[in-house]
Amino acid sequence: MKAAALYTGFCALVAALFLLVPELDIAASRLFYDGTQGFYLADWLPVRVIEAAVPWIVRAMVVLAVAAALWLAFARRPLWRVDRKALVFLVAATVLGPGLIANTVLKDNWGRARPYQVTEFVGARQFTPAPLPADQCERNCAFVSGHAALGFSLVSFALLLPMGWRR
């Protein structure tokens, strides 16, 4: 319970910081921006490869979940360490985190424009401090990062590793 309170307090502190000093957000983005070229690394091959891989990662996770469920149904034993509880945990970690909360609830309803879309970086939209909802984007907006949410959900697979392997 103490850890949850610390985490909640930390999140509130960070949200307050970006709300009270929104220039931090623009300043951080400006570190990666050149007025003539746009954002550095936007067309860098590793970035494009990772971005293109995300849908395939999601598909692989779905295939793994279906395979594990079928294995459990027919073989009546876990596939590697994926028993019923682990399967529910993996599916919930992916569906609830990046699927429902990040992409459906926040990204499609928050309305915050992406950095390249705001006037500070030659876009047409207005900048909005991170914790505030806005009306600058209709869906698939900047807040929160769906790619980052999916990346963090991959940690759920690591939590199924034996204790010695986690280190």
Image (cartoon, grey):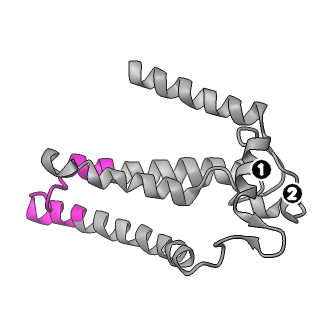
Q: In this view, does 76 lie above or below 46?
A: above
Residue drawn at 50 percent across, 73 percent down:
50
Q: In the picture provided, is 51 more to the left or to the right than 155?
A: right
Kind of residue sitting beneath label 1: Ile
10 Å neighbourhood of mark 2: few (<14), some, or many (≥20)? some
Taking the view exactly as shown, the residue that stands out farthest to the bottom is 45
The residue wearing badge 2 is: 120
> Along the line of sight, which residue is nearer the eye, 53 or 138?
53
Disc 1 versus disc 2: distance between alpha carbons? 8 Å
Q: Main secondary structure of the magenta part?
A: helix
The residue wearing badge 1 is: 26
10 Å neighbourhood of mark 1: few (<14), some, or many (≥20)? some
Residue 36 among magenta residues: no
Residue drawn at 75 percent across, 34 percent down:
19
Q: Magenta stretch: give its range.
A: 68-89
Residue drawn at 81 percent across, 45 percent down:
128
Kind of residue sitting beneath label 2: Glu
> Along the line of sight, which residue is nearer the eye, 19 or 37?
37
Residue 70 among magenta residues: yes
Residue drawn at 81 percent across, 63 percent down:
117
Residue 104 horizontal/vertical position (percent) = 60, 53
> Along the line of sight, which residue is nearer the eye, 25 or 157?
25
Secondary structure, mark 1, is helix
Marks 1 & 2, CB-CB < 8 Å contact = yes
Q: How many labels does the image show?
A: 2
Secondary structure, mark 2, is helix
Q: In the picture provided, is 158 more to the left or to the right than 13?
A: left
Residue 18 horizontal/vertical position (percent) = 71, 36
Taking the view exactly as shown, the residue that stands out farthest to the top is 2
